[in-house]
Image (cartoon, grey):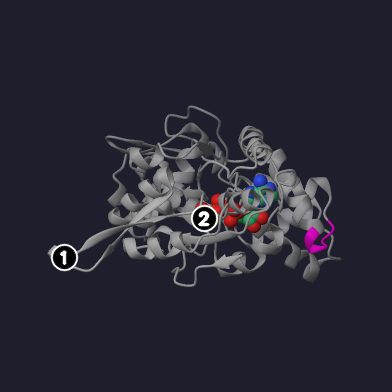
Amino acid sequence: MNWDDTAPPTDTDADGRLVGAAADGEDQAVEAALRPKSLAEFVGQERVREQLDLVLKAARQRGATADHVLLSGAPGLGKTTLSMIIAAEMEAPIRITSGPAIQHAGDLAAILSSLQEGEVLFLDEIHRMSRPAEEMLYMAMEDFRVDVIVGKGPGATAIPLELPPFTLVGATTRAGLLPPPLRDRFGFTAHMEFYEPGELERVIHRSADLLDVTIDPDGAAEIAGRSRGTPRISNRLLRRVRDYAQVKADGAITRDIAAAALKVYEVDKRGLDRLDRAVLAALLKLFGGGPVGLSTLSVAVGEERETVEEVAEPFLVREGLLARTPRGRVATPAAWAHLGLVPPQGAGPGGNGQQDLFGA
Ligand SMILES: Nc1ncnc2c1ncn2[C@@H]1O[C@H](COP(=O)(O)OP(=O)(O)OP(=O)(O)O)[C@@H](O)[C@H]1O
Ligand SMILES: [Mg+2]
């Protein structure tokens, strides 16, 4: 494997939360050990796996280089993992770089011209590449050729350079930001979905085996339910629960141990953390469930507007706890139920506000 050491860290949006989906430093250190190495080991994403399996098998049978593959999906769902699996399945070397690392077309030309035949080029955060590099990539993907510009000004000339066939694997969390000409040049696009709890349980059992941690099925289910559909979060929560089990018990993870540990870390039964609950609580208790403007809500929580909008809200919206409407943020009945509060009109399921969110 050949890491491009000019690449800046790609986790610029890591937010340091236990339930944040971006990779933090500790994740990066352990992820290599926990990554499935083959398609057969890769949990869930059945359709993507089946389709990719066909693409790769067919290419192998023809003795050809696999078509370019675009992987899109939220952080922590397995895009980097799949890119490495593609290389492993093709028995090809992989070269890893990222959009932000390629600011000049020359950077890309240097990488492309050093590829071996059949090599996999993994281009993470492909939506963050510069425009000139992007245009060079179009030609490289389609014709396996680049024009290298030599000289400056009126005397500059373009020297065509043949490239060996290679497989570009692009990854993006924002497929919608890719220009259509780029998207169209991928032979296969895989959309990664959030994982079902049962799939995350399998991820957790697999990781526990690799980390040599004892966990029972209820313990795995408890962690899976709080993982926001994201294997990276499952693995991170598993490590924190392991710490707790080791210090406070005999090291084995049960449902009670998992619930008690995640109560300490303030990750509730639904995977909300303290910030998520603070946003919901302000919306319900101070504004009667809304609608209220984002700025007002942010001031009430004591957070930056961007933090509320980009860090807390996406998951609350996905969970059906909060809606963004033209008139402002509105809580859903599920939000009242989750915090154990009664909506003002007394409608909907109620409680006394004493609900145990942590199940510990
Ligand atoms: N299908 C899966 N089966 C088992 N483990 C998985 C699976 N998908 C992801 N993981 C685990 O989750 C972690 C994060 O995966 P990965 O780094 O591939 O995510 P990503 O989509 O590249 O995230 P980002 O957008 O932040 O780069 C890895 O350690 C990997 O072990
Ligand atoms: Mg990645």
Disc 2 is placed on an element classified as strand
Which is nearer the N-term, disc 1 or disc 2?
A: 2
Residue at image point 51% right, 43% down: 68
Q: Is residue 72 visible?
A: no
Camera-side residue: 31 or 66?
A: 66
Residue type beneath disc 2: Leu
Observer-side mark, 1 or 2, equals: 1
x, y percent for residue 211: 78, 63
- Packing grade of label 2 (10 A; few <14, some 14-19, many >=20) is many
- Residue type at the position of mark 1: Gly
Does 91 sit above or below residue 31? above
Dominant SS in magenta: loop
The residue that disc 2 covers is 121
Q: Which mark, by number, is residue 155? A: 1
Read off the magenta span: 210-214
Q: Are marks 1 and 2 in contact (CB under 8 Å)?
A: no
